[in-house]
Amino acid sequence: MRLSTKSRYGLRALFDIAYNAGSQPAQIQDISRRQDISPRYLEQIFQGLKKHGILKSKRGPQGGYCLAKSPEDITVRAVIEATEGDTLIVDCAGRKKGECGFDGSCVTQTVWEESNSRLNEFFESITLKTLCERGEALGIKREQDHRFMYFI
């Protein structure tokens, strides 16, 4: 299984939001700068994450992107499925019985199904909260988004 940059960058960006912005909207320019990801590409990735109910956006001067759920409720598996479509190692691991000409006579089919199951369990066990805890343990400094202040 080879994950695309969509899932890798999507997970990094979501970590960034959870770690640096918390419940406040995060500016895409700040996420882009901290994670070294093109703002335009982030916008594309964020559309899929919004569609799957992981992210939400707010317009206006105090707007930006924020998590649609709490960090402990967003798993790595959910992010991968939102960006990649599925987490299958090989196509036959996700087929229904009878869809493969080798059903019942393919010794490797069980290997792919079991590895896919174990990988999904692993991805399901890691949340954004887990990543934030790992970020703290690594000593990654938190940075507040740059907001424009308007004085009357």
Image: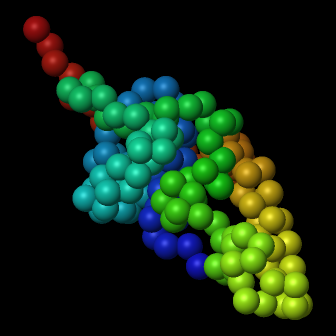
Q: Which residue is drawn at 43% across and 58% down?
A: 35
> Seen in the image, is 64 located left or right of residue 106?
left
Query: Can residue 12 be spotted in the picture?
Result: no
In the rendered image, the residue lying farthest to the left is 152
The answer to which image quadrant residue 152 occupies is top left
> Where residue 133 sits in the image (x, y, percent)?
70, 43
The answer to which image quadrant residue 65 occupies is top left
Is 68 located above or below residue 33 in the figure?
A: above
Q: Residue at x 57, y 58 (%)?
A: 81
Q: In which quarter of the image is the N terminus?
A: bottom right
Q: Which of 54 and 137 is in front in this view?
A: 54
> Where residue 138 sits in the image (x, y, percent)?
68, 53
> Where residue 124 sits in the image (x, y, percent)?
73, 52
> Seen in the image, is 16 located left or right of residue 95?
left
Q: Residue at x 30, y 52 (%)?
A: 43
Q: Which of 78 and 92 is in front in this view?
A: 92
Q: Residue at x 28, y 48 (%)?
A: 29
> Seen in the image, is 34 located left or right of residue 85?
left
